Image (cartoon, helix red, strand yellow):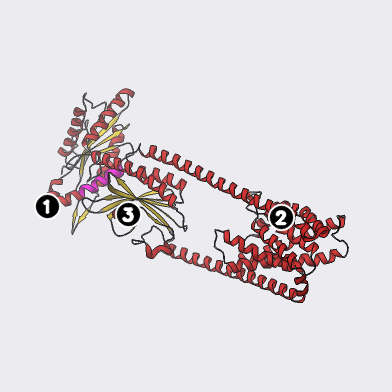
């Protein structure tokens, strides 16, 4: 692993350790709060056990309403990610009408029931004891605060009739309830290392303003209970609870509809991107351009900071050419053996591979985990299959766990199928137009481009030039070192020519050790400068074969349009060939145009 990779892993472990410490402190806080609340409730109820027996029915009824109201929590502002529960109305009613310490028992029972109901339907796995401790402790602490406040307020106002004092008492309980909740929440967030201010802004902006309506509900429930007891309280309390249940169902229906709409929008966007990819990649016959287009669109719909394409070659040996895109930058890697990694497995198995967590799934992966970077956690690969043959592999990698889903794999496989068609077309085009040894264009393609350029130049009155190049004494390399060594040298010469060319130039392997280059929009002076650069670089080129070093020179002849154009393409090429012959005649390793004369100052070779 590189130093950067080691530092990255060390930093990640340090952050993970700090996160574990914060989580440990939060757990201790939750368990302590729950244990203290349980102890306080048990202590109070022990000394009031006769009262509990006498008022057991109201305690059970209020506890059930609080637990069910918490379960039926609903949302009015989905964007705020906050749910509203009417358990506050039932708890404040209990604080108004039940004698001390029964509201504590109501809060304790309601918290246990609410936790049980909420965790049963929750899709997120949370430790039951931790959630129970935190919520029980929070609700009991709130009830304890409200209980002492209600004892004080009861000295001045009773809840038998509706008076301003009664209203002010409910408002005071509402404020005490919310402030106690805020205090418990702030301590929890500080221990977990979460920002406090954004949560407080959201809480006071949405939650308190939305829960204001619990005050008139509390007044109504308390007055009914004071007038007719538990049976007068039940009809309105049940109606409120049923309304909460209906609102929760509406929330669920709205969420399902929203999820369906998002899925439809995602699918529509994916189809548009698939259509765009298919349209764009079909216009290019260059594998690197095809890959760049595919990578750009894939990164629009997937978390794909790392993406690579491997083109598989079975002949003459099992190898692959790889194109890599990292953060939008495309690079080409040299051809190498197939190996035993993800690429080899996908090629042989001819089916996609999805790894959602490399750390967890490492032992169950059917191949060696060869990755682009040490932080990679998610991998998705798909074979490129054309006419029943695997021609390569398309793969994306992400440092995020579970970055890809089965739905993502389906879309990715479709993209891979489109890419396979475009890449096979590009490969067939290259085989028909590009020399496989030097990777320069073949003669037929060169003739076609030369004819097109001549027609364009004639129409617009522009100029172009042709270079005819031939390696000097190349036969000696073949005779003394063999044709394999000669081929290796030709490969390097092809690299020199390609690296010297501009984007619009058309270099061609004309035959054997002879090359021809079309230079559009280039006059004789410009062509001479380009030819001299090639000549200089070839003269410095050294290719080591075993203990031997291969080196030679190159001669160049130049013909310019329209000065040297005799009326036919073939005649024009013969003009360039005559200039090349003159360069050979004048001693090789030189650049000569059709207008040149022998240079007596330069010795022949």
Which residue is drawn at the image coordinates 31% and 57% (left, top)?
345
Discs 1, 2 touching: Cβ within 8 Å? no
Residue 494 sits in quarter: top left
Looking at the image, residue 567 sits to the left or right of residue 235; the answer is left
Looking at the picture, tell me which residue is in the foreground, 44 or 599: 44
Q: Mark 1, residues whose alpha carbon is within 10 Å: few (<14), some, or many (≥20)? A: few
- Quarter of the figure with residue 464: top left
Horizontal and vertical percent position of residue 93: 77, 60
Q: Position of residue 520 (x, y in %)?
A: 31, 32
Q: Residue at x 86, y 55 (%)?
A: 162
Q: Nearer the viewer, mark 2 or mark 3?
A: 2
Quadrant position of the C terminus in the picture: top left
- Give me the C-alpha separation between circle 1 and circle 3: 44 Å
| Number of marks drawn | 3
In the rendered structure, the answer to whether residue 82 lies left or right of residue 284 reads right
Q: Report the span colored magenta.
A: 489-501
Q: Nearer the viewer, residue 565 or 81?
A: 81
58 versus 394 height, above or below: below
Residue at disc 3, secondary structure: helix
> Between marks 1 and 2, how big is the CA–CA gap?
103 Å
Residue depth check, mark 1 versus mark 2: number of the one nearer the observer: 2
- Few, some or many C-alpha atoms within 10 Å of disc 2 (few <14, some 14-19, many ≥20)? few
Discs 1/3, front: 3
- Label 2, on which residue? 238
Horizontal arrangement in the rendering, residue 158 relative to residue 595 (left or right): right
Foreground pick, 494 / 97: 97
Give the residue pinned by disc 3. 346
Q: Are marks 1 and 3 in contact (CB under 8 Å)?
A: no
Q: Which residue corresponds to mark 1?
A: 480
């Amino acid at each position: 692993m590189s130093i950067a990779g080691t530092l990255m892993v060390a930093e990640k472990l340090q952050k993970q350790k700090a996160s574990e410490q914060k989580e440990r402190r939060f757990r201790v806080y939750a368990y302590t709060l729950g244990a203290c609340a349980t102890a306080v409730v048990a202590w109070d109820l022990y000394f009031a056990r006769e009262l509990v027996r006498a008022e057991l029915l109201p305690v059970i009824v209020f506890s059930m309403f609080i637990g069910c109201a918490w379960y039926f929590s609903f949302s009015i502002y989905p964007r705020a990610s906050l749910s509203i529960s009417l358990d506050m109305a039932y708890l404040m009613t209990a604080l108004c009408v039940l004698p001390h310490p029964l509201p504590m028992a109501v809060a304790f029972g309601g918290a246990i029931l609410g936790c049980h109901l909420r965790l049963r339907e929750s899709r997120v796995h949370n430790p039951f004891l931790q959630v129970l401790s935190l919520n029980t402790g929070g609700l009991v602490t709130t009830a304890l605060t409200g209980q002492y406040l209600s004892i004080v307020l009861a000295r001045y106002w009773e809840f038998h009739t509706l008076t301003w004092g009664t209203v002010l008492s409910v408002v005071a309980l509402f404020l005490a309830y919310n402030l106690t909740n805020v205090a418990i929440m702030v301590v929890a967030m500080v221990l977990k290392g979460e920002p406090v201010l954004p949560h407080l802004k959201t809480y006071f902006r949405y939650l308190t303003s939305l829960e204001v309506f619990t005050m008139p509900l509390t007044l109504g429930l308390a007055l009914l209970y004071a007038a007719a007891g538990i049976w007068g309280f039940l009809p309105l309390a049940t109606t409120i609870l049923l309304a909460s249940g209906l609102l929760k169902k509406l929330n669920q229906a709205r969420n399902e509809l929203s999820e369906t709409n998002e899925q439809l929008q995602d699918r529509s966007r994916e189809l548009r991107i698939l259509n765009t990819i298919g349209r764009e990649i079909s216009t290019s016959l260059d594998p690197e351009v095809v890959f760049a287009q595919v990578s750009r669109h894939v990164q629009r719909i997937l978390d794909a900071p790392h993406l690579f394409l491997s083109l598989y070659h079975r002949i003459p040996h099992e190898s692959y050419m790889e194109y890599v895109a990292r953060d939008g930058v495309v690079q080409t890697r040299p051809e190498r053996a197939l190996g035993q990694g993800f690429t080899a497995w996908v090629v042989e198995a001819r089916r996609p591979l999805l790894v959602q967590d490399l750390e967890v799934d490492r032992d169950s992966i059917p191949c060696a985990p060869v990755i682009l970077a040490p932080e990679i956690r998610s991998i998705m690969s798909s074979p490129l299959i054309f006419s029943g043959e695997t021609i390569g592999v398309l793969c994306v990698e992400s440092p995020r766990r579970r970055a890809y889903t089965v739905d993502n794999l389906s879309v990715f496989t479709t993209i891979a199928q489109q890419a396979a068609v475009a890449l096979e077309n590009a490969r067939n085009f290259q085989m028909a137009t590009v020399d496989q040894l030097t990777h320069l264009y073949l003669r037929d393609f060169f003739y076609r481009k030369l004819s097109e350029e001549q027609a364009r130049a004639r129409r617009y009155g522009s100029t172009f030039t042709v270079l005819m190049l031939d390696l000097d004494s190349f036969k000696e390399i073949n005779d003394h070192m063999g044709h394999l060594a000669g081929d290796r040298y030709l490969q390097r010469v092809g690299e020199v020519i390609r690296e010297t060319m501009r984007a619009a130039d058309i270099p061609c392997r004309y035959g054997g050790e002879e090359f021809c280059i079309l230079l559009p929009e280039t006059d004789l002076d410009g062509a001479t400068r380009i030819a001299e650069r090639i000549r200089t670089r070839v003269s410095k080129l050294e290719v080591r074969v075993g203990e031997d070093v291969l080196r030679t020179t190159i001669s160049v002849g130049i013909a310019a349009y329209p000065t040297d154009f005799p009326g036919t393409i073939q005649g024009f090429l013969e003009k360039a060939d005559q200039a090349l012959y003159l360069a050979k005649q004048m001693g090789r390793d030189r650049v000569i145009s059709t207008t040149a004369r022998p240079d007596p100052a330069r010795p022949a070779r």
